[in-house]
Amino acid sequence: MSHKNESLQKKNPLSAPNGYLNRSKQQIKKLKYVQISVESYSHLRRLEDQVKSLEEQVNGLEDEVKDLNEKLFAAQLEMTNKENPVKQHAKAESEAATLKKSPGVLVLLKLTAEHRASHLDGALKEYMRQIHNLKEEHEQKLHDVIQNKAKQFDKIKHEFEANLDQQLLRSAAENSALSSSLSAAVNSALSSSLLERSSMVIKLSEKKFPS
């Protein structure tokens, strides 16, 4: 009798509803792993490459600014070296004041000192003019480079942001489509499972209660 019952349970389709439900759950679980398409993934990778490219460009701008700062420092050092004639001029005046106290050479020393002072004054003015022009030139170059690089960076930034917005909108649309497809697949799997189970119940009923 027990052997007969076991045989009926094996043949009885109602004894296997859990198997169908488990299979449906596995199908749903597999479908949940679908998140984005290969195209969306490629777009996101390209966006990452663009970000890396922007970072490299920013690093290049920083290197150029650093190089200009070094050139400005060199110009300031040159300015300091050219200011040495001012100190020489002061030293000459001090020496002239000392020598003027010596009798007999006062007139000669005075003429020599005046000539030397006139020469130093002219050289000093020329040096100061060159220093001023050099400083203005370097400052203008630095300002122009910074302005141009800032404009380039802003342009690249705006283009990147616009492209990023488009890619995000496209990814959102694709994700929505994938979500709808996933929902339809889940509903189809559940409907198929329910129809199969209903068919089996009807067949079993027909076997138990033949007309």
Image (tube, helix red, strand yellow):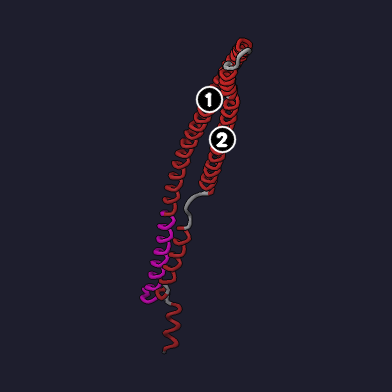
The residue at which mark 1 appears reads as 139
CA gap, disc 2 and disc 1? 14 Å
Q: Residue at x 38, y 66 (%)?
A: 198
**Is residue 153 left or right of 204 when viewed as pictured?**
right
| Residue type, label 1 | Glu
Residue 36 location (% of width, % of height): 48, 50
Q: Which residues are magenta?
A: 183-211
Foreground pick, 53 / 42: 53
Q: Quadrant of residue 29?
A: bottom left
Residue count near mark 2 (Cα–Cα under 10 Å), binned few <14, some 14–19, many ≥20? few
Q: Would you say residue 200 is visible in this rendering?
A: yes
Q: State whether residue 165 is above or below residue 196.
A: above
Mark before the other along the chain sequence, 2 or 1: 2
| Helix, strand or loop under label 2 | helix
| Helix, strand or loop under label 1 | helix
Mark drawn on residue 66? 2
Mark drawn on residue 36? none
Q: Residue at x 46, y 37 (%)?
A: 161
Q: Quadrant of residue 49?
A: top right
**Is residue 114 left or right of 21 when viewed as pictured?**
right
Q: Residue at x 42, y 47 (%)?
A: 176
Q: State whether residue 186 is above or below residue 211.
A: above
Foreground pick, 60 / 53: 60
Work out which residue is located at the far front of the displayed protein and give it: 103
Q: Main secondary structure of the magenta part?
A: helix
| Residue type, label 2 | Lys
Q: Would you say residue 127 is visible in this rendering?
A: no
Q: Residue at x 42, y 51 (%)?
A: 179
Quadrant of the image containing the C terminus: bottom left
Foreground pick, 193 / 28: 28
